[in-house]
């Protein structure tokens, strides 16, 4: 029996169907996140690069809602990390995923300061520290010049920052200094940079010591003198600084990558100020940010797709792109070297400042109040009460420690059972 001849239109349909079948054959995995629209768009571009670079796997971004079950990949913010660490049973360790997929992976090659809280002593990682940074000081160079300050000599200490704020105010600035991420900058990193703890050896919070109280009282004085303007608990201050409204800002080192597009004034970057009357300062700041977690209970093909995406993220060229586009700290020594050699000097100013700050053992401190959501909220409520002059600094921090110690066990227990 002779088969009928296929018309050109029929052939086209056959091949179209074949192409569709081939596309459907690709293993699809979801990457859940809680990023804002701007950051989600940046992540989307990275995902598109991976998807277009091979035909076997496709990653799709999905927005995570509180209480959602873990997806194959889960991008966890700094504030969520403690919750995910406590609920580790719902996730598969990253090093195991990579081993089973036979993808080269050595967690010990990632910078130690980035692995804190995400792995064991042998360097085995159960999540990937993908988008980390540390706080630095930004200055508006034009505002400095107007105030008679040398923009090439930004303040190194809080005492110098106060003198700069005074001159900025006298020159007409309505916002000499501001800050984003208050608990991360003014409790976690203030403590580490100045050599004091936020908790004792048993994990009890104790960030109400002399250094923290003195610093909080200083900030209250600044607010009263209108040297310090507070805009909110997240990155609200970043936008005000980028608009040219403020003379100085403490915020994430990763912000520098976004400033050239948004800023209205030339920006300088310097190390986070420290208290020079505290012995042994400065010490080390802390790296923090987003990490990538792998949901448990998936199919082998889906884990193979996860492993392929992680390998893509760890390529030095991808790391350079993340540093250039988003300012994040490169994860490996090789990637850090590549970033410094391939990027323009102006692009790595904040990176170099950040890397210098992270040197030393204090950067390995695992407990950070900004990473435990209920505790962070308490701390920022009490900081706001102090900075607004409603309560004395010591009273605010004593109350924050007391409330935090009550809330922390319940918060971690609740996360573990979800």
Image (cartoon, rainbow, N blue to C red):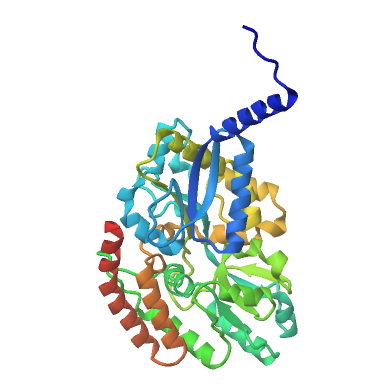
- Residue 269 falls in image quadrant: bottom right
Between 54 and 393, the residue placed more toward the observer is 54
Tell me the quarter of the image containing the N terminus. top right
Tell me the quarter of the image containing the C terminus. bottom left
Q: Is residue 22 above or below residue 397?
A: above
One can see residue 217 in this view: no
Q: Position of residue 214 (x, y in %)?
A: 42, 83
Q: Position of residue 372 (x, y in %)?
A: 37, 66
Q: Is residue 174 above or below residue 133?
A: below
> On the picture, is 123 further left or further right than 337?
left
Q: Position of residue 101 (x, y in %)?
A: 44, 32
Between 406 and 124, the residue placed more toward the observer is 406
Residue at point 69%, 24% (across, down): 11
- Residue 384 falls in image quadrant: bottom left
Q: Is residue 99 above or below residue 333?
A: above
Residue at point 56%, 54% (across, down): 329
């Amino acid at each position: 029996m002779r088969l009928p001849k296929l018309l050109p239109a029929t052939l086209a349909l056959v091949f179209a169907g074949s192409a569709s079948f081939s596309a459907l054959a690709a293993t699809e995995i979801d990457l859940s996140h809680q990023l804002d629209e701007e950051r989600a768009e940046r992540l989307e571009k990275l995902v598109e690069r991976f998807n277009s670079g091979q035909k076997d796997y496709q990653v799709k971004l999905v927005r995570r809602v509180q209480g959602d079950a873990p997806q194959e990949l889960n991008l966890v913010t700094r504030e969520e990390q403690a919750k995910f660490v406590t609920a580790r049973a719902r996730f598969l360790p990253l090093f195991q995923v990579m081993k089973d997929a036979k993808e080269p992976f050595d967690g010990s090659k990632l910078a130690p300061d980035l692995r804190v809280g995400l792995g064991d002593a042998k360097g085995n990682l159960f999540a990937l520290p993908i988008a980390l940074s540390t706080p630095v000081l930004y200055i508006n160079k034009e505002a400095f010049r107007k105030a008679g300050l040398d923009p090439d000599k930004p303040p190194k200490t809080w005492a110098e920052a106060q003198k700069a704020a005074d001159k900025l105010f006298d020159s007409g600035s309505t916002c000499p200094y501001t800050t984003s991420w208050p608990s991360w900058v003014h409790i976690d990193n203030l403590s580490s940079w100045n050599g004091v703890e936020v908790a004792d050896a048993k994990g009890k919070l104790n960030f109400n010591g002399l250094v923290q109280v003195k610093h909080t009282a200083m900030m209250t004085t600044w607010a009263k003198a209108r040297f310090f303007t507070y805009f909110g608990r997240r990155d609200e201050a970043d936008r005000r600084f980028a608009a040219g409204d403020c003379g100085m800002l403490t915020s994430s080192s990763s912000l520098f990558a976004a400033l050239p597009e948004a800023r209205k004034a030339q920006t300088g970057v310097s190390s986070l100020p420290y208290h020079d009357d505290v012995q042994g300062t400065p010490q080390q700041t802390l790296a923090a940010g987003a990490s990538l977690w792998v949901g448990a209970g998936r199919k082998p093909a889906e884990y193979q797709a996860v492993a392929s995406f992680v390998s893509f993220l760890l390529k030095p060229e991808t790391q350079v792109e993340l540093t250039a586009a988003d300012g994040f700290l490169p994860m490996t020594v090789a990637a850090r070297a590549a970033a410094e050699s391939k990027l323009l000097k102006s692009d790595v100013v904040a990176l170099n400042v950040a890397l210098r700050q992270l040197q030393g053992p204090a950067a390995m401190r695992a407990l950070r109040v900004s990473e435990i959501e209920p505790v962070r909220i308490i701390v920022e409520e009490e900081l706001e009460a102090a900075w607004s002059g409603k309560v004395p600094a010591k009273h605010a921090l004593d109350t924050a420690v007391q409330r935090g110690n009550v809330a922390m066990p319940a918060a971690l227990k609740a996360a573990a059972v979800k």
